[in-house]
């Protein structure tokens, strides 16, 4: 069983990294759409609710889809006072505890509340409140449970890797820890 855990963590990490690299292109699209909106509004005097809402959608997609990749790359804010000077074993213990007691339960709560919320939105194919707005609010709301699933997946990978470090440290002779 323990032989398949690193492979599972590797698969999760590759999947999350692929999503993260794809989201980079959304950032470029976000900048281009924002530039077009500003150009239309201030140079030509043309406003577009559809274009303004697409910026909100893109912004939400970037943050919600890239959060797990950011966690994988250690890009999330953490209190680094103790962690930076900790041994690999202590870091693994902190990562395992954080994943199991904080990250995974919090993602479960998000999923618990988001699924009915998103289901209602899909059942009516929720649209923008603006007449000329985007008709895809249900897709925007779908990012919430997707975010939770991606974060939970990365949390599982992080927990697997931390447990393997702790397991190997426990097996190592006392002088090699």
Image (cartoon, rainbow, N blue to C red):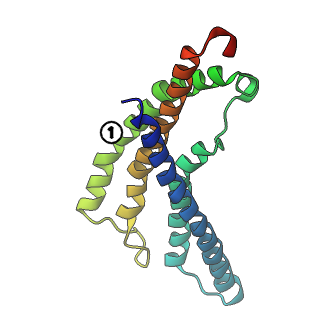
Name the spot of residue 89 as percent of width and height, x first.
63, 21
As drawn, the residue found furthest toward the left would be: 123
Vertical placement of 132 versus 165: above or below?
below
Q: Quadrant of the C terminus?
A: top right
Name the spot of residue 24 as percent of width and height, x first.
60, 64
Residue at (58, 82) in percent of width and height: 47
- Residue linked to disc 1: 112
Quick check: can you spot residue 177? Answer: no
Quick check: can you spot residue 138? Answer: yes
**Under tag 1, what secondary structure?**
helix
Side (left or right) of 87 relative to 163: right
Foreground residue among 80 and 129: 80
Side (left or right) of 99 relative to 113: right
Vertical placement of 136 versus 42: above or below?
above
Residue at (58, 19) in percent of width and height: 169
As drawn, the residue found furthest toward the bottom would be: 44
Residue at (49, 45) in percent of width and height: 10
Residue at (47, 24) in percent of width and height: 101
Question: Which quarter of the picture shows residue 110?
Answer: top left
Name the spot of residue 162 as percent of width and height, x first.
54, 28
Vertical placement of 104 versus 173: above or below?
below
């Amino acid at each position: 069983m323990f032989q398949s855990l690193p492979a599972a963590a590797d698969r999760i990490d590759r999947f999350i990294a692929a999503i993260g690299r794809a989201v980079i292109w959304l950032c470029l699209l976000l900048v281009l759409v924002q530039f077009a909106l500003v150009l239309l509004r201030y140079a030509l005097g043309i406003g577009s609710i559809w274009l303004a809402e697409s910026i909100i959608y893109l912004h939400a997609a970037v943050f919600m889809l890239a959060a797990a990749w950011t966690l994988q790359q250690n890009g999330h804010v953490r209190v680094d006072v103790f962690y930076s000077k900790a041994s690999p074993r202590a870091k693994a213990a902190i990562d395992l505890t954080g994943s199991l007691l904080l990250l995974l339960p919090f993602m479960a709560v998000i999923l618990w509340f988001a699924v009915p919320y998103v289901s209602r939105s899909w059942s009516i194919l929720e649209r923008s409140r603006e007449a000329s707005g985007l008709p895809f609010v249900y897709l925007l709301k779908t990012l919430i449970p997707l975010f939770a699933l991606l974060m939970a997946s990365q949390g599982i990978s992080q927990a697997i890797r931390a447990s393997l470090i702790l397991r190997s440290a426990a097996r190592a002779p006392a002088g090699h820890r």
